[in-house]
Image (cartoon, coloured by chain):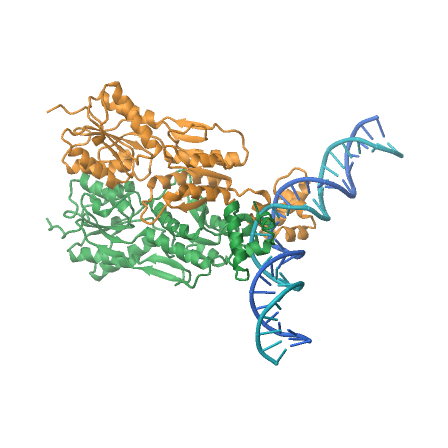
Chain colours: A orange, B green, C blue, D cyan
Amino acid sequence: MNLKQLSELLGLSQTTVSRALNGYPEVNEATRERVLQAVKETGYRPNKAAQRLATGKAGSIGLVMPTAPGHQSDVHFGEFLAGLGEEAVRHDFHFVIMPADPDDEVAALRRLAISGNVDALFVAYMRGHDPRLPMLKSLAIPYVVHGRSFGSEPDYPFVDIDNEGAFYDATRLLLQLGHTRFALMNGPMHLDFAIRRKNGVIAALAERGLTLDEDCTSHALMTDEQGLLAMERFLQLPDRPTAILCSSTVLALGAIRAVNQAGLRLGEDISLIAHDDVLPLLKPESFSVPLTTTRSSLRAAGVRIAQRLIGTVKQAGPFPDQELWKTELIVRASTGPAPQQP
Amino acid sequence: MNLKQLSELLGLSQTTVSRALNGYPEVNEATRERVLQAVKETGYRPNKAAQRLATGKAGSIGLVMPTAPGHQSDVHFGEFLAGLGEEAVRHDFHFVIMPADPDDEVAALRRLAISGNVDALFVAYMRGHDPRLPMLKSLAIPYVVHGRSFGSEPDYPFVDIDNEGAFYDATRLLLQLGHTRFALMNGPMHLDFAIRRKNGVIAALAERGLTLDEDCTSHALMTDEQGLLAMERFLQLPDRPTAILCSSTVLALGAIRAVNQAGLRLGEDISLIAHDDVLPLLKPESFSVPLTTTRSSLRAAGVRIAQRLIGTVKQAGPFPDQELWKTELIVRASTGPAPQQP
DNA sequence: TCCAGCGCCCAAAGCGCTTTCAATTATGTA
DNA sequence: TACATAATTGAAAGCGCTTTGGGCGCTGGA
């Protein structure tokens, strides 16, 4: 059943039927009722491809999913998707996911954009001086970035959290507790959030005349395994740190295993603050020693970005271009006073 | 730049250019070269919507992502997606993800199918007597099911693991170790894999004249929290189980926390076998007591299903309709002889 | 010498929808 | 009554691609 058949069945023109269905005002209410009734009876559904060809709109937002054989799938990504999805479903939008080799992201994003398969793009895993930014700007398709790109002029639409502030505050808390030897367990070095978090730590330390040692910094994928490895390294240092800043509860999972294996007590021998993306799988309050965290829901960010993207496509009012969310610092049992010097 | 402009530029007809691009044989090699060259120079990309309208093919596979405010995002889902993606990227396919309220999945799937946005469907989270099956059969769009539907005639294309066999084998191992009091920590009761796993346990127990107590069975979302709760319940039973079968390493995570909190030792007081979907986040060998598991990679299943789906769309040879993968039983430290009766 | 057959290429007809431009009728207004 | 105006509806022109049904010039066997 297509438009033509439907209109013949109703004795109307395709024009009128189309208008009736799309809510145009210039069609008689009685006629519209008839059309709607017929749609119900026949189960007619407009052909999306045709609609798209005619309007240029696809009703979808696109994103690139980094993936490759051997590429670690990222829990954070799934959670973010759930947020996007939650909002998209309210507007009858869908996603087009273009899987791509992480080395090929710029090209993949461009392909996705000019494929005409999507109305808007969502971009994540931002890096410093991210090469996707100039590309996106040249592309004339709406987009929102999750995160920012350190070193690039912030003249693009984004939703980000105050990573620097979060880690600054966390560090200050540990300083107030008397800690002086710090370590940072961070995400991959090239990622924007990692850069900013590190800066936050450094800034807070600098106020007390302290510095962050290279040995006491790790940059790695945010998996529990990497957390374990990094912590083992820290613990073997001659003058081992007592205060750990950690970029994810996933990293913390491994880190804490290392602490336990070393026979140390979390919250006493070692204080740890992790950033909590509010992953349903890893609740900081369910850790055997509940975790002090800086918190900001990844999922909520997904919802918000979807809102902005869909709103823009539907021309539903202006949105603030740039949003910087504050994080919460939630104190639990994994932080305590610095142990007395032996 | 569109086909028309490109063909004018080349002094050819649209027909010839189109054929040259799509690899039809009836075009002169020299001409084809010229066309390809021009494409490179102009950066011409065919409009997907138009292609789709003309051919009816979309180059995409669709799936429904269950989501809702408050709905737990599922790590397993993300991992599976990564597998699908890995294969899709090799064939320049993409996904269309239709987010849907879990209560609305049948309708969402139908919408997706008739939207014309996808060439094939992937279906997961199968239930007993799954209502999506008859719907899919009536739909004339290729699909592959991940899992099966207990109680439905197995006359649909699927990739599944031998859940019953896996849990049968796991139970037998524990029986051989002398255990007699069993508990099963399962996924949601309505899901197919949960039903089959339970049956596997029951079958193995029956051979020794044992039964699985209702009190010793839990059905819940596969989160660490639920694992904790279930295990706490088990441990409070007057005659508490010594052998635990567990449907996921995620559940095991919580379960083990409960074991530790109760001051019991895993592999001695309590033996536990979990099913391992090979989630990168939770490696059974990295648990403080390495986990004995039944193993089958979720990601590999994703790759395989994508292969079949894409192959079918591209008419690339016949595929076996139904694949049942064996799982591996990998013994580590979380299983040991049944403790002596006090 | 003829004509079937082949190699290449083209015009034009869709695919199913939206939207512009116009036409027709009904409604006021002078 | 006459004419501008609003209210409805239609015809037809795309959107950019694929594909059908020829057409034209050559070659080679009869």
Q: Nearer the viewer, residue A112 or B122?
A: A112
Q: Nearer the viewer, residue B200 or B60?
A: B60
Asked whether residue B150 appears in the rendered view, the answer is: no
Q: Quadrant of residue B230?
A: top left
Q: Is residue A210 left or right of residue B130?
A: left
Residue A270 lies, in percent from the top left, at 18, 30
Where B147 sits versus A172, above or below?
below
Q: Is residue B196 left or right of residue D12?
A: left
Q: Quadrant of residue A249?
A: top left
Asked whether residue B141 appears in the rendered view, the answer is: yes
Where C2 sits versus B324, above or below?
below
Residue B314 lies, in percent from the top left, at 46, 58
Q: Nearer the viewer, residue B217 or B269?
A: B269
Residue plotted at (12% across, 50% down) = B339
Q: Quadrant of the C terminus of chain A?
A: top left
Q: Quadrant of residue B316?
A: bottom left
Q: Is residue A126 left or right of residue A269?
A: right
Residue A315 lies, in percent from the top left, at 55, 34
Q: Nearer the viewer, residue A237 or A96?
A: A237
Where A39 sits versus A314, above or below?
below
Q: Quadrant of the N terminus of chain A?
A: bottom right
